[in-house]
Image: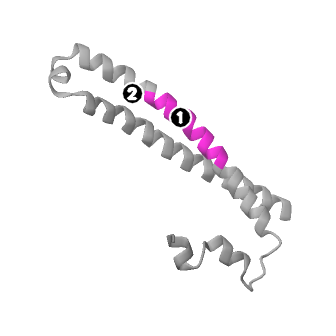
Amino acid sequence: MGILSATGGSSVERARNSVVIASPNEEEKRLRAEKFSQEGIRAGFKAAAIGAVASAVPTLIAVRKIPWAKANLNYTAQALIISGASIASFFITVDKTILTSARKHSQAEYEKRA
């Protein structure tokens, strides 16, 4: 017996069985949000890959050439530096891409109504 069966199912199942009738635009809004999210994720992965390479090269060179880095940055520290840069670039890019897409869409809707 799982948690979902104990709580009465998922929220999607409850929404489908509810009495509330969805707006005709709900499906369009959901599809648009999914499209914007996919665009953001795709751009985020590209930025994360570039950020990983851009932070890995100087980190690895510094560990081999600079005495302080050689003495103080072990493998864990190097991995944290590289992954921190790629994770930050992923989330920043996803956020900016989704917001840009939503802004463009809302401006297009506004101009279409005017």
Q: Check the image and name the residue furthest to the bottom.
A: 19
Residue 10 in the image: x percent, y percent?
60, 72
Sequence order check, earlier mark of 2 and 1: 1
Q: What residue is drawn where x is 62% and y is 40%?
A: 42
Say which quadrant the C terminus sits in.
bottom right
Q: Check the image and name the residue furthest to the front.
A: 1
Structure colour scheme: one colour
The image quadrant that residue 53 belongs to is top left
Badge 1 is on which residue?
Answer: 47
Q: Is residue 42 magenta?
A: yes
Q: Check the image and name the residue furthest to the top.
A: 65
Q: Pick whichever, 103 or 79, lies toward us.
A: 79
For residue 55, the mark is 2
13 vs 78: above or below: below
Secondary structure beneath label 1: helix
Amino acid identity at mark 2: Ser
**Which SS does the magenta portion mostly show?**
helix
111 vs 8: above or below: above
Number of residues whose C-alpha sits closer than 10 Å to that of mark 1, classed few (under 14), some (14–19) or many (20 or more): many
Q: How many marks?
A: 2
Q: What residue is drawn where x is 84% and y is 65%?
A: 113
In the image, the segment drawn in magenta is 38-52
Secondary structure beneath label 2: helix
Number of residues whose C-alpha sits closer than 10 Å to that of mark 2, classed few (under 14), some (14–19) or many (20 or more): some
Residue 35 in the image: x percent, y percent?
71, 51
Q: Is residue 32 magenta?
A: no
